[in-house]
Image (cartoon, rainbow, N blue to C red):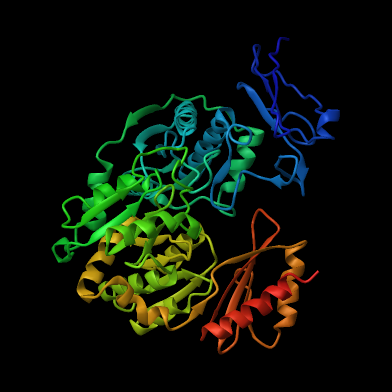
Amino acid sequence: MSHEHQMVTTTSVYVAHISIRRTERCDDRLATDISGPSMGGVVGGRGGQWAENPCRPYAFTLALSIHERLVYYDGMSHTSIFKSYDIRGIVPTQLNVELTNHIGAAYVDLIRRETGVSNPTIVVGGDMRTSTPDLKQALMESLATAGAQVRDAGLVSTPTFYFAVAHGPHHGGIQVSASHNPKEYNGLKMVRAGARPIGKGNGMEEIERGALEGVPAWTGERGSVTELGHVMDELLAAEAGDIDRSKIKPFKIVVDAANAMGALDVEAMFRGLPCELVKMNFELDGNFPAHQPDPLDEKNLAMLSDAVKEHGADFGIAPDGDGDRYFFVDEHGDVVRQEILRGIMAQIALAEHPGATVCYDIRPGRITRDLIEEAGGKAVVTRVGHSLIKQTMLDHDAVFGGESSGHYFYKFPFGTFEAPVPFVLKFLVWLSDQNKTLSQAVAPYRERYAHSGEINSTVANVPTVLERIKTRYADAQIDLLDGVTVTYPDFWFNVRGSNTEPLIRLNLEATSRDLMEQKRDEVLAVIREE
């Protein structure tokens, strides 16, 4: 019996990959014990053996088993690239063409089993990262090999990708992107029909298992790859066709696109508007030469804030790396906090849908709840995470949702997902109606509560700290929806552990700045106790 063996090892990630390709009869079986001193006793296949899977190339990624789960080991921490909401890792040591092939096959297998469709139609898009073309090409090839009819959406932002999936007769889609991560990273965002997210607890584990252990080879007809054109024109008509753009004043607006995907969407949404657009860093460049495309970190807004003041602009806008989060600064260069923006946008949505439900994440931002309730809406609090908020919106038939990190979600007849085009255009209409500067328009909301911002603390043991918080503040109202939320009449806070690092994240609000600073320091001292 002849087999082809190949061992590949990486330098910074201790991962071995062995491919064994059958050259003889399909009913042959192979079971090979896997071990190796350099791996410290690895787990291979099922029970330390190759899983039987006749009539297909054998492929298996070996990795250390932590808590009976396969993860990658980078020499410092145990980190799975299969995250809560997407797949994300460093290229090529954690995510590469070969693993992308296996993920594509596992994804088609999942969609086929869920839908019963032999040749599902799958949309594929990608961002401007330097590793995206190779990963995207490998992904489309693996999907087609597995029998999928692939629709190539080209170079698109993540919200445009979501629209492309949801607006057509598609069974799902995958976007090649690592959002706002540094340039070394890339990833895969996977959705079902209607752009419904795939994450931990609703499919991610099955894809991880299928990618690492293999899935049955597709023996039916090979799929195809065709281009999906005119996506942005269709998006503008479907998502923003009913917005009265004639109400928008001729604002002077600085936009810092951070050399990332938001540049494409901003160009499209401002087409035909009377606004003067000052464009910064609009050239797509996956090396991010200006700064990291993460506006949640305020140092990445410094260039925008300075430019707004230098140009005498009315305000500034900053999308993130894959264009699914948007941040605003006022005419003074000061950031407009997300809880204020989502409260304003919630009131706009409730004016269109009286009495409807609006979702927002649990991190403090009480102004959001206030504005929802003042407009007669129903406020539903969710766990943190864009896929969790979208699922909660679907469960409650919510018309709008907002996350503290800058995601804004709308319900459409064809799906519920991030939609920055109507978000920005409706905000411009609202601000035009105020007849005030942006800082004047949001001043009443800024003054109502004082917010600490999100503060990260490295801790030895996250569960121990959360238990300490519950004990120390046992006389408060305690909510365990996501981490620990503690509420007193004049201050409230949420502490959550990171999914990937030994970090505690604190968000605290109070009815005055002095009280906020006092309680912020008090809670941080509790978190950081030795």
Coordinates of residue 273 in the picture (x, y in percent): 17, 56
Residue, x 19% and y 61% (percent of image)? 242
Q: In which quarter of the image is residue 215?
A: top right
235 on left or right of 299? left
Q: Nearer the viewer, residue 415 or 83?
A: 83
Coordinates of residue 501 in the picture (x, y in percent): 68, 55
441 on left or right of 192? left
Which quadrant is home to the N terminus?
top right
Residue, x 40% and y 73% (percent of image)? 340
Coordinates of residue 107 in the picture (x, y in percent): 52, 39
Q: Which of 373 and 406 is in front in this view?
A: 406
Q: Is residue 419 visible?
A: no
Which quadrant is home to the C terminus?
bottom right
**Is 425 rendered above or below residue 230?**
below
Q: How many marks?
A: 0
Coordinates of residue 369 in the picture (x, y in percent): 44, 79
Q: In which quarter of the image is residue 8?
A: top right
